[in-house]
Image (cartoon, rainbow, N blue to C red):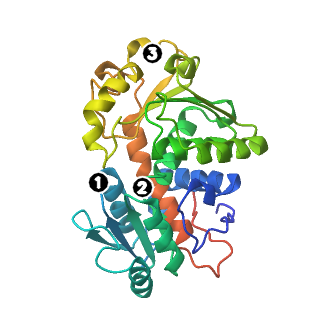
Amino acid sequence: MAPMKTLPQLAQRDLISIQDLSSGEVESILDLAAEVKAHPSDFRNALQGKQAVLMFEKPSLRTRMTFEVGIQSLGGSSYFVDQTQQRIGEREEIGDVAKNLSRWMDAIILRTFSHSTVAEMAKHATIPVINALSDLEHPCQALADYLTLQEHFPDLQKLKLAYVGDGNNVVHSLLLIAACLGSQISVATPKGYEPEKAVVERARDLALLSGAKIEVVNDPKTAVMGADAVYTDVWASMGQEEETTKRAKIFADYQVNEELMLLAARHAVFMHCLPAHRGYEVAAPVIDGPNSIVFEQAENRLHVQKAILLLLMSDKRSESVNYWSNHA
């Protein structure tokens, strides 16, 4: 029998931002996700009788599927509420929605346009609220990304991650998690499209404690030089479709192609949170090449989110839970 592992004090807490987590809690989520991935049968009934609602204002493939499969594979149930035609809070005040759901459900999972929607839900709910994407952050994606990186580069404090493209919600969460874990991250965006100043400043504050190196530049070659991993995302996120043509011109020099990848370390991997647009933010030979780990990232959304659900939906009265059974 493996020794009992003490879980971090995340029971019944919210996950709105990477800022909600200490470095130790981030590490614990990644450790538990690795255990879940390696021994899924050990967790089969861990959330038996638990129920979660997914309320999504945006279309989704990976986020919806991985949360629904994740909850059900842990013995719980999920209920999907399509909010793509009417945003949360339009028909009924968010506070009232939160109070209703808190009486029926064990967790609320939100995919929204405005980050304030997630924050307002968490303010009024008495059950965990999970940010499955907002315009400010994408914490579940960043956690899955770092699980994937850890599988390739076990010592994350020696890792250099380069991000090239739009300073969006994904890069916000990557900056914060890199700062938590002591990694080096270099972000390159066109002028005027940098990540939000407050997020960068918070990442730099965290870096003072962890030893992380945070760099925000406008030259993609500078960012990618010697990187262990090169990451990009779409140039126009959902809700910015009217800017697609304009952004295609502005971001033309920020495509991750074979020439740019040559500046990274020889072993460098390519990352993308998907969906991807070949010929725009990434060249087809890069995303479809042997060093692309984009589908590993997608798979790890499942394992990380299962870990998040286990930790947040666990009984607050239990200080530690032995989810691990016999295995070496």
Secondary element at tag 1: loop
Relative image position of residue 180 (x, y in whole percent): 67, 46
Quadrant of the image containing the N terminus: bottom right
In this view, the residue in front, 249 or 18, is: 249
Q: Considering only vertical position in the picture, is 79 above or below 116?
A: below
Secondary element at tag 3: helix
Relative image position of residue 185 (x, y in whole percent): 60, 32
Secondary element at tag 2: loop
Query: Residue, x 62% and y 41% (percent of image)?
Result: 178
Which residue corresponds to mark 2? 133
Q: Are the two marked residues, 2 and 1, in contact with CB atoms closer than 8 angstroms?
A: yes
Q: What residue type is labelled 3?
A: Leu
Q: What residue type is labelled 1?
A: Ser
Which image quadrant for residue 226? Answer: top right
Which residue corresponds to mark 3? 260
Which of discs 2 and 1 lies nearer the camera? The answer is 2
Other residues around mark 3 within 10 Å, as few (<14) / some (14–19) / many (≥20): some
First-in-chain label (2 vs 1):
1
Q: Give the alpha-carbon distance from disc 2 to disc 3, as whole Å.
A: 29 Å
First-in-chain label (2 vs 3):
2
Relative image position of residue 179 (x, y in whole percent): 66, 42
Which residue corresponds to mark 1? 60
Q: What residue type is labelled 2?
A: Leu
Residue 39 visible within the image: no
Horizontal side, residue 129 vs residue 327: left or right: left
